[in-house]
């Protein structure tokens, strides 16, 4: 017997093998042999069912078909081919392989991230009695426990493996199933279900006889005279489907729901169906509503035309171009022109956006131009919606996709252009789970695989990107005027400490900011207030002894959320009641310290009781259309002040915003990370860019305790180049990216000592790897414990040569798997993060 299924395969007509990507933590693919019955059909991208290990049946994807038998093991045969056509193409598999090798993870992990779960198969082992088996007269003797299982099967017909767990201990189950199989008493099979289900609409139409002969219809009306409800149904139908003018229309019929929504009685519809006047039928429909296209041609301004030509010109010699256009310069219109061109040539286009930007102005602008031809890929979409976009790409319905980073996994086969908007956005980097990829970098790789062009658009380029411009790898196009010559906002620094001394700081707001808010309110203009911290207060503390409540599972203080009246851990979600008394000294003088968005919102309502205030942060946007609702509300003008975290920095374009206030710039600037300067420049510039987009000049107030800092001058004058030059001096001196490649390894374990030992050993192994590098750590992570696991970090700084990196990563991966095969470290987790953020 060859396998679990008792199948004996005949010798294959030719020796054909397939490398299969499996959803298990093995570094590479696994080779199986291809039986003669599927040799003609199988190919890259098909799903197959295979036996993995002794008992597991898995579905995987064919990565390669070849004739080379594996050396280390005897190849098992593929059990079943699941598709009539490949569900992923060869370019996708190449892209997956690049992700796995560059980001040091398993191909199976990439596959898991890439396939919408609607296309993954759920496999559950089921057991039933062998049809030839006779329980009263078995060919082989059965022991008691085998009989137990067989008797259960006699009653139930089929059972899941886990249902059998209740009859016999799990540890013996495998053995029993195996022996029952050998005795030909049972069959084991997989019930494989496609999870995707198309959306079905129930429709009705007139029976054919009423269409071919029009007098039939008159007879019908005569016949049902007086049956008002049925008449009503027919009249409503004819109103919506004017078959007198166009009899073909009857064929597509009308959704039953349209009739019932219009007040028709469902039972009358059913009666008409029963009497064969109407017939009911089902159609597969799209989950997305149709969209109206705006026919107006786009008219680029002179500056935009110039920039557009410059991009095209750069494409002659470079495949990636940075479009560095200040906020409000009108990058969108340039994208549109580029996209149109590529679509006309018959190639596909992908436009990547950071999460939140998907619900904004930019999307509705593009929708007006491209209508239904544009597919949107949202991270909050349901599985079915994702599969629908996926299939739309394959069918050619969507040649243009705008989406979040995971849209890189869609089955494109001929991309001509990839655009990464707001390319500097840190949220393009995925942290968990693997692959821990950066969507911008992956997009450039994908464009390369398709021989496509890439545009990176931003007002504040990432240093990595700008340095590639300086090295002449990327083309460069600058736009430094706002569209329609709208003026850039005026910046003001407000000194927090000075106001505090003079007693002018009220509820976190300096006098200047309060005055400007009042002014905006008086003029009926809108205000954005930026605070990069959610919750009410970052922590609470005892006034007497300084005690601060911390998370039971993580090394962090708990954030106070006033609305729910609870303390929450922002790392693991742990919740606790707000203590009435100090747990250390018993004092009841517990105060909240610092301000998150929730408190800022409250403070604003105390300072400006007449203002209508809304808050946008993770807590208010959890639902699917959470962002959209808030943005619509703000856009409608029913709100005066919007308070929010960095979510409000992205792509908002509202005419009436005349003031942007940054409550605490120091919090962004002094974050302990080598990128904090770059981040501050980006965040402040971006949020400032929301002010005064049209007509009127806007104002930006930056509150700080250190107004003397140089970076403020650079932000205010918009002098990116000078800021870059200075920061890069430091980066070079201290070996930071983009001068080196960083890899971070996080070592996690529930036992402190084990985590520490494993990380020390890993460091030693890494140090032995040849090549120029600096290895820092292991050190306890900034937050040393999360979800009851202790965290140690090792940072590696590698020289930039690609070859050196590839070599190092291979050795590093080997070192980690060596360590993991050590009994002591089996349950230690090693997370590798290449180019960490
Ligand atoms: P960016 O993304 O560069 O910050 P946007 O593309 O949002 O800028 O454009 C800024 C504003 O100018 C938007 O309101 C947009 O509608 C308007 N705009 C830009 N270009 C044009 C154009 N060619 N015709 C009409 N309006 C334009
Ligand atoms: Zn105390
Ligand atoms: Zn926690």
Image (spheres, rainbow, N blue to C red):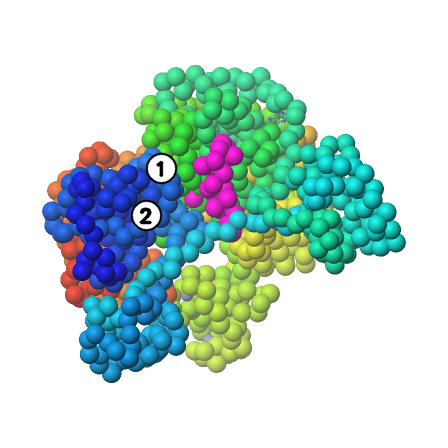
Please say if 96 is above or below 607. Answer: above
Does the residue at mark 1 contact the one at mark 2 (Cβ under 8 Å)?
A: no
* Residue 392 inside the magenta-drawn segment: yes
Which residue, given by chain and number where applicable, does mark 1 sit on? Answer: 89
| Nearest to viewer (mark 1 / mark 2) | 2
Quick check: is the Cβ at mark 1 less than 8 Å away from ligand 1? Answer: no
Quick check: is the Cβ at mark 2 less than 8 Å away from ligand 3? Answer: no
Q: CA distance from mark 1 to mark 2?
A: 16 Å
Q: Is residue 191 left or right of residue 621?
A: left
Q: Is residue 42 visible?
A: yes
Residue 469: give x, y in percent of width and height: 36, 26
* Residue 622 inside the magenta-drawn segment: no
Check residue 81 in the rendering and tell me which mark sits there, or answer none: 2
> Dot 1 lies on which element?
loop
Disc nearer the start of the sequence (1/2): 2
Q: Is residue 496 visible?
A: no
Residue 673: give x, y in percent of width and height: 36, 47
Check residue 679 in the rendering and tell me which mark sits there, or answer none: none
Q: Give the residues in magenta.
A: 381-406
Residue 821: give x, y in percent of width and height: 16, 60
Residue at the (28%, 71%) spot, across then down: 133
Q: In this rendered view, identify the residue nearer to me: 227 or 261.
A: 227
């Amino acid at each position: 017997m060859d396998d679990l299924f008792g199948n004996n395969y005949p010798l294959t007509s030719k020796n054909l093998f397939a490398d299969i990507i499996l959803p298990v933590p093995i570094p590479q693919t696994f080779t199986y042999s291809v039986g003669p019955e599927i040799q003609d059909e199988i190919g890259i991208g098909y799903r197959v069912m295979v036996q993995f290990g002794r008992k597991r049946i898995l579905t995987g994807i064919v990565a390669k078909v070849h004739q080379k038998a594996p050396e280390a093991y005897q190849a098992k045969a593929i059990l079943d081919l699941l598709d009539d056509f490949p569900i992923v193409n060869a370019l996708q598999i190449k892209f997956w392989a690049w992700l796995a090798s560059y980001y040091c993870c398993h191909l199976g992990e990439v596959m898991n991230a890439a396939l919408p779960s609607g296309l993954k198969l759920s496999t559950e082992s089921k057991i039933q009695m062998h049809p030839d088996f006779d329980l009263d007269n078995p060919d082989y003797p059965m022991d008691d426990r085998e009989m137990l299982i067989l008797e259960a099967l006699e009653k139930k017909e089929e059972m899941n493996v886990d249902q059998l767990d209740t009859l016999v201990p799990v540890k013996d189950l495998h053995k029993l199933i195996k022996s029952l199989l050998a005795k030909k008493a049972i069959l084991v099979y997989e019930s494989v279900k496609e999870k995707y289900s198309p959306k079905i609409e129930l429709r009705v139409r007139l029976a054919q006889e009423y269409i071919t002969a029009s007098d039939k219809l008159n007879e019908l009306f005569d016949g049902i005279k007086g049956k008002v409800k049925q008449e009503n149904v027919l009249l409503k139908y004819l109103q919506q489907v004017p078959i007198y003018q166009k009899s073909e229309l009857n064929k597509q019929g009308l959704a039953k729901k349209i009739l019932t929504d219009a007040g028709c009685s469902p039972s009358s519809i059913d009666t008409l169906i029963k009497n064969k006047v109407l017939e009911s039928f089902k159609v597969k429909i799209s989950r997305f509503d149709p969209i109206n296209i705006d026919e107006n041609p786009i008219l680029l301004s002179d500056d935009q035309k110039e920039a557009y030509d410059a991009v095209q010109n750069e494409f002659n010699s470079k495949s990636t171009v940075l479009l560095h256009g200040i906020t409000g310069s009108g990058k969108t219109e340039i994208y549109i022109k580029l996209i149109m061109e590529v679509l006309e040539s018959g190639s596909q286009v992908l436009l990547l956006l950071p999460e939140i930007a998907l619900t904004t102005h930019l999307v509705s602008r593009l929708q007006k131009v491209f209508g239904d031809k544009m597919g949107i890929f949202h991270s909050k979409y349901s599985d079915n919606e994702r599969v629908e976009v996926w299939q739309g790409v394959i069918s050619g319905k969507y040649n243009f996709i705008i989406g979040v980073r995971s849209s890189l996994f869609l089955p494109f086969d001929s991309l001509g252009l990839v655009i990464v908007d707001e390319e500097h956005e840190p949220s393009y980097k995925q942290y968990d789970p693997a692959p821990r990829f950066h969507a911008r970098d992956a997009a450039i790789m994908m464009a390369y695989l398709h021989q496509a062009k890439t545009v990176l658009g931003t007002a504040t380029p990432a240093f990595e990107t700008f340095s590639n411009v300086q090295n002449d790898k990327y083309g460069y196009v600058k736009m430094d005027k706002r569209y329609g010559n709208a003026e850039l906002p005026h910046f003001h620094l407000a000194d927090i400490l000075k106001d505090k001394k003079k007693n002018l700081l009220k509820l976190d707001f300096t006098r200047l900011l309060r005055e400007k808010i009042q002014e905006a309110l008086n003029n009926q203009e809108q205000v954005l207030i930026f605070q990069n911290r959610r919750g009410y207060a970052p922590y609470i503390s005892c006034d007497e002894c300084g005690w601060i409540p911390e998370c039971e599972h993580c090394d962090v203080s708990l954030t106070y959320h006033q609305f729910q009246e609870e303390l929450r851990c922002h790392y693991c979600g742990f919740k606790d009641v707000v203590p009435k008394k100090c747990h250390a000294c018993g004092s009841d003088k517990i105060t909240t310290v610092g301000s998150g968005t929730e408190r800022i919102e409250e403070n604003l309502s105390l300072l400006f009781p007449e203002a209508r205030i809304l808050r946008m942060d993770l807590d208010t946007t959890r639902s699917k259309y959470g962002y959209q609702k808030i943005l619509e509300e703000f856009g409608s003008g029913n709100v005066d002040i919007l308070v929010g975290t960095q979510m409000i920095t992205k792509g908002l374009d509202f005419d009436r915003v005349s003031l942007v206030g940054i409550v605490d710039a120091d919090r962004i600037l002094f974050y302990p990370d080598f990128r904090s300067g770059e981040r501050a420049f980006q965040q402040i510039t971006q949020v400032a860019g929301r002010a005064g987009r049209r007509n009127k000049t806007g104002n930006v107030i930056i509150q700080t305790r250190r107004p003397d800092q140089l970076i403020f001058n650079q932000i205010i004058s918009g002098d990116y180049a000078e800021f870059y030059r200075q920061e890069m001096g430091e980066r070079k001196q201290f070996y930071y990216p983009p001068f080196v490649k960083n890899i971070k390894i996080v070592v996690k374990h529930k036992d402190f000592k084990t985590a520490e030992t494993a990380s020390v050993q890993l460091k030693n192994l890494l140090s032995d790897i040849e090549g120029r590098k600096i290895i820092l750590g292991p050190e306890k992570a900034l937050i040393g414990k999360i979800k009851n696991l202790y965290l140690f970090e090792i940072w590696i700084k590698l020289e930039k040569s690609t070859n050196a990196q590839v070599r190092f990563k291979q050795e590093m991966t080997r070192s980690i798997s060596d360590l993991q095969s050590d009994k002591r470290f089996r349950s230690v987790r090693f997370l590798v993060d290449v180019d960490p953020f």
